[in-house]
Image (cartoon, grey):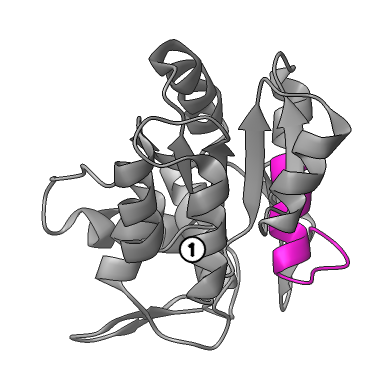
């Protein structure tokens, strides 16, 4: 999954990014409201972490503009302001949740996961396809009850594919969601990871779950 952090405190932004990357998120950063608004409108994210007080354009304005343009990406408002009026203003602007600095990363991660689940209207975080089960919160993958060990990128690709069950996912879509905005790697990097992923989840099973759609992408 892919997250945008719009936060002008670079040290805090980098700390949040480090924790999210360790949790297998692809993370883009913007350090002012102008860049943050542009990325939020032009790129597709699973969630936006948006600071309230930003240079150039503030978080409330960004949030309002995104909602006016019918961009429904979940927004977690992040700010040092803690008054009821500030919280109400943030939520009224279109934010989905509000967390006040200082905060624990455990709480931030919990709120992020809850917002993403809610946006997907998932009653359960467990993703299922036939006998394959994926738990995005615990990073556990099972096939017919047997535990499968995946690398972080393999897990991220599998989770993304499961979000588009029975639909074709292009290589570009995978790169944009599993890697970050600045990725400039090998053109066949997706094929390499999908081949490894397919080998792992199809081992010992007669049902092959990942199909290659030649010239287009993949489908699970």
The answer to whether any part of residue 149 appears in the image is: yes
Residues 194 and 63: in front is 63
Q: Is residue 116 magenta?
A: yes
Q: Say if the magenta span includes residue 34.
A: no
Left or right placement of residue 61 versus residue 30 in this view? right
Rendering coords of residue 205 (x, y %): 60, 71
Circle 1 crowding by C-alpha within 10 Å: few under 14, some 14–19, many from 20: some
Q: Quadrant of residue 20?
A: top right
Residue 85 on image: x %, y %: 82, 37
Q: Which of the pair 44/183 is nearer the observer?
A: 44
**Residue beneath label 1, please?**
65
Counting from the top left corner in percent of width and height, residue 62 is at 48, 52
Q: Nearer the viewer, residue 204 or 130?
A: 130
Give whichever of 22, 149 is nearer the camera.
Answer: 22
Name the chief secondary structure element in magenta.
helix
Q: Which residues are magenta?
A: 111-125
- Which residue is drawn at the image coordinates 26% and 68% (left, top)? 172
Residue 196 in view in this figure:
no
Against 61, residue 144 (above or below) is: below
Q: Which residue is found at the position 79% from the left and 27% from the top?
A: 107
Q: Residue furthest front?
A: 85
Whether 81 is drawn above or below 97: the answer is: above
- Report the residue at 11% width, 50% height from top: 186
How many numbered marks have been drawn onto this rendered protein structure?
1
- Asked whether, in this view, residue 124 is left or right of residue 151, the answer is right
Question: Residue 190: percent from the left, percent from the top?
Answer: 27, 59
Q: Is residue 162 above or below residue 7?
A: below
Q: Tag 1's secondary structure?
A: helix
């Amino acid at each position: 999954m892919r997250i945008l952090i719009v936060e002008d405190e670079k040290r805090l932004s980098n700390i949040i990014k480090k924790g999210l990357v360790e949790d297998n998120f692809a993370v883009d950063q913007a350090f002012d409201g102008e860049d943050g608004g542009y990325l939020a409108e032009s790129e597709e994210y699973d969630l936006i972490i948006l600071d309230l007080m930003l240079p150039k354009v503030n978080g409330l304005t960004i949030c309002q503009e995104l909602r006016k343009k019918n961009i429904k990406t979940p927004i977690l408002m992040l700010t040092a302001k803690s008054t009821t009026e500030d919280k109400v203003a943030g939520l009224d602007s279109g934010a989905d949740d509000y967390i006040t600095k200082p905060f624990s990363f455990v709480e931030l991660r919990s709120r992020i996961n809850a917002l993403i689940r809610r946006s997907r209207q998932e009653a359960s975080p467990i993703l299922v396809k036939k006998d394959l089960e994926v738990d995005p919160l615990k990073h556990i993958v099972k096939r017919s009850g047997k535990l499968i060990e995946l690398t972080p990128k393999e897990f991220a690709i599998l989770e993304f594919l499961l979000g588009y069950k029975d639909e074709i996912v292009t290589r570009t879509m995978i790169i944009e969601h599993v890697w970050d905005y600045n990725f400039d790697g090998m053109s066949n990097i997706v094929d390499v990871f999908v081949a490894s992923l397919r080998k792992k989840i199809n081992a010992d099973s007669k049902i092959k779950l990942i199909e290659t759609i030649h010239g287009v992408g993949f489908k699970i």
